[in-house]
Amino acid sequence: MRTRLKDLAEQAGVSTATVSRVLNGKAGVSSQTRKSVLAALDVLGYDRPEKLRTRSEGLVGLIVPELTNPVFPALAQSIENSLAERGFTPLLCTQSPGGTTEDEYVEMLIEHGVDGIVFVSGRHADTSASDDRYQRLRSRGLPIVLVNGFAEGVDAPAVSVDDTVAVELAWRHLVSLGHERIGLAIGPDRYIPARRKLAAFTAALRRRDPGADVAEHVVTTLFTVEGGQAAGGELIDSGHTAIICASDLMALGAIRAARSRGLAVPEDVSVVGFDDSPLIAFTDPPLSTVRQPVTGMGEAAVSALVSEISGTRVPRTELLFHPELIVRGSTGVARPYAERRSGAVSSA
């Protein structure tokens, strides 16, 4: 037991006496310290003593898209942590092409008696989908929260990253580096975040060149590495020295497209991603990106849902979170297109 207490204390960053107080359920320990000790128990693989197991306040459904894009697991983790801090048990539902649909998950969650549901980048973000599914849930009195995709008219709180600011941050950064031909690699325009990013890009382009043909600088594809590679290749071939991508995965694809043409990043082409997904700082080169404030968004979504569950109505206006530009190694000073091409040929 002495070794166990010592290991737990080292992991939690507290004294063995504090660990002992937590394990024995004694008073005089802050909630943050208690949380650190419980986390140490989990990390080191110890079962929590029966007296430390709290009774769940209720079940909350969490529906997220496929997990191949690492920003979705990050959002799910943030939301689950916030739910656990408030005593709720999350039921995570992940979608995949050809698998269980959002509507099917909703029915299963209702059967399990959930107290509310958080939807992350779900059908509410798709302008081609009907909002009736959410209206039906609200008519049953079930609290819901929508994340990243404001559905006007749906009686529910909404939490989103500010896509307009995200594009403006990336655009200004690239312009400051001397880039004049900046392209946008974006996903299907039926999605609200994609539409907002496209609108912001169009506004920035028109401020610089009122007569610009926006279509010449935008490629619509999928939010995947392959989609980014296809879009990046097309933009590079049309003379763009910098590319703003709608996701980090697309940005990695754009870098792949540049390298397949004998070009270097950032010496020949600068690339900016979006999300700041986990581990993205360790790519080659480390990716410059616009960070979604995942932790804050998750906490806000849970706070709104818990308030709704407790009977306190939350304002229906969309809560927009300001993103942050993270400059790393995938962006650099602009190099003339002709020089880039001659350099690629000579290196080949």
Image (spheres, rainbow, N blue to C red):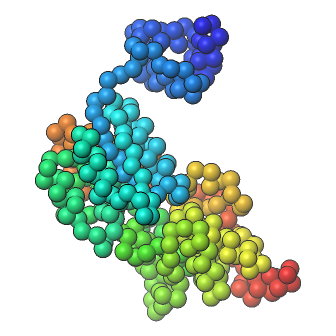
Q: Residue at x 71, y 61 (%)?
A: 285
User: Which one is in front, 179 or 183?
Assistant: 183
Q: Residue at x 67, y 75 (%)?
A: 257
Q: Is residue 10 above or below residue 245?
A: above
Viewed as shown, does residue 303 lie left or right of 25?
A: left
Q: Is residue 10 above or below residue 344?
A: above
Specify the quadrant that holds the N terminus. Answer: top right
Specify the quadrant that holds the C terminus. Answer: bottom right
- Figure quadrant of residue 60: top left
- Residue 327, image x and y in percent? 62, 59
- Figure quadrant of residue 91: top left
User: Which one is in front, 322 or 146?
Assistant: 146
User: Which one is in front, 248 or 45?
Assistant: 45
| Residue 124 in view in this figure | yes
The single residue placed furthest to the left in the displayed view is 139
- Residue 317, image x and y in percent? 24, 57
- Residue 43, image x and y in percent? 57, 28
Q: Is residue 157 above or below residue 185?
A: above
Q: Residue at x 29, y 58 (%)?
A: 103
User: Which one is in front, 186 or 170?
Assistant: 186
Viewed as shown, does residue 227 lie left or right of 102?
A: right
- Residue 113, image x and y in percent? 23, 40
Q: Residue at x 67, y 70 (%)?
A: 255
- Numbered marks: total: 0
- Figure quadrant of residue 195: bottom left
Viewed as shown, does residue 210 lie left or right of 250?
A: left
Q: Is residue 76 above or below residue 41?
A: below
| Residue 147 in view in this figure | no
